[in-house]
Image: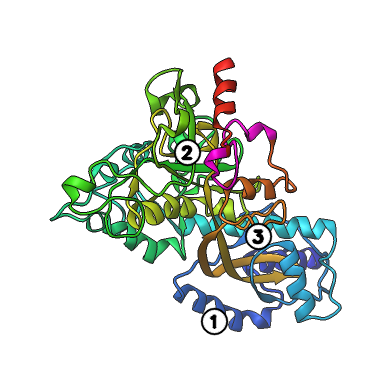
Amino acid sequence: MMFSMKILLSLIVVTTVWGYKKKDDESSRRQGLRALKEDKTHWIKTKELVQKGRRLIAGSGSCVPDQLNTNGCDADTIIAAVAEAVPGCDELDNDESRSALNEACNAIKAAQDDERTFNLATGRSPRLSPLISDEEELSIYYMGGGELNLKRDNENDKLQNIARKINQVYEQFAQDERIAYPRTVQFHQNKGVVDTDPDLVYPTCAHNVLMCCFSSDRQANDNNGNCAEPYDENCVDADPADNTDICYADHSRLPQASRVAAGLSIFKDEEEGDTHCHGMVWSEDIYEDQARFAGNNLFYISMYDHLYTRGYVENIPGAPMCGCLEYMATVTRADCTEMDVTETFSLEFDCGEIVGGRRTSLAIAFNACDGDPNNNDDNNDLESEIASYYDGEFPDELRQYITGPTNNDQANSNCQAAIDTALAA
């Protein structure tokens, strides 16, 4: 009986004192947790997020420190941090431990993203209301319509003044907090609603590529495009800086954008005029930086870098202004932006198992893509960045969307061959 009571008391201590190995550590640990609560960031109890009772290391003789500060959260980073903190400690360097570490880190990231995600349409101030007040208006913008696409500079009303909230979002959120990825039709391979928390939606494009193509310039005096003063003469039908050829738009790719079920809009011999395309790429792993923060990159490309900074707006007829690559017009090339994401974490361990963690800092920098499949330093090129995800070879199945060449050499454009193929289909 006495033995059973001891076991029961031990279980009570284990299940009620979270993350503690020794009873006499309780006071100091509580002080630490109290400090974390005062820090306005959220400590994530991974025991509530991962399979209960799973252990990396059995027993109480673990050499893993009780607490670690890491630059990132994944198995490789944690194992390296443990080895640096405790030379010779390699007990986590095995397949089972790596899998469990990654699972725990993914749980921490998802929970942290759930707590700290800004929604452009419905989020706290400075959200884009009244210009964009809900997901439907956000979808209209990404299709190429709505006030943000139709407004232009005039003598009394500058586009940058109208869109000043975009700059506020960039300064206050885009660089240090996750922006929600849209749930709208343009950004998912199922062409529809994603039944989940709108702030935790991740991109589901068929090829993990997203692109925006702009057909108009609405803003003068920014050294981009040919909108100029006087506005009523030189900014009525102005064009962006040309960086691509539009070959054709296939209306069947996304009928919601063209409002017809099928058909082609064909642009021979550069009939479309000057146009500008820009894209982004991510991996299959939704916890990878380019996927987790895809909403940030989309906001930066579409709203900050091109609308607010350059005044680029409106879609190519027959396609959305921004969307999954498989919904967009067929083009020769596009520019490309990737993010450099720096995250730091504070992690707590018990007998080698992660039992708690929080993100202590996040910094996102937006840079030209550095994809370089042929060692030619092909920066700022979407095709080259895609190829870097496929061992340096651009997939043949994507040639129906991006024809090449990567240098926008219009004399050697592949558009006519792409048009001929589309017409023969």
Quadrant in which the N terminus is drawn: bottom right
Q: Does the magenta stretch include residue 401?
A: yes
In front: 287, or 314?
Answer: 314
Mark 3 and mark 2 in contact? Answer it, CB < 8 Å: no
**In the image, is 47 to the left or to the right of 177?**
right
Secondary structure type for disc 3: helix
**Residues under labels 3 and 1: Cα distance?**
24 Å
Q: Where is residue 229 in the image (x, y as percent from the top left)?
A: 20, 54
Label annotation for residue 105: 3
* Residue at (48% x, 21% y) in the render: 252
Tell me which numbered mark, 3 or 2, is placed earlier along the sequence: 3
In which quarter of the view is residue 310 placed?
Answer: bottom left
Residue 58 visible (yes or no): yes
Question: Residue at image x 83%, y 81%?
Answer: 87
Can you say which quadrant of the picture contains the C terminus?
A: top right
Q: How many residues crowd mark 2 within 10 Å: few (<14), some (14–19), many (20+)?
A: many
- Is 171 part of what is drawn in magenta? no
**x and y, in percent, of residue 194 in the image:** 49, 36
Q: Mark 1 points at which residue?
A: 31
Q: Give the range drawn in magenta.
A: 396-411
Secondary structure of residue under mark 1: helix
Query: What type is the residue that disc 3 sits on?
Result: Cys
* Residue nearer the viewer, 372 or 409: 409
Residue 126 coordinates in the image, percent (x, y): 30, 59
Q: Which residue, given by chain and number where applicable, does mark 2 sit on?
A: 323
Which secondary structure is most common in the magenta stretch? loop
Camera-side residue of 353 and 101: 101
Going 60% across and 39% down the picture, which residue do you hit? Answer: 404
Determine the residue positioned at 24% across, 47% down.
Answer: 235
Q: How many marks?
A: 3
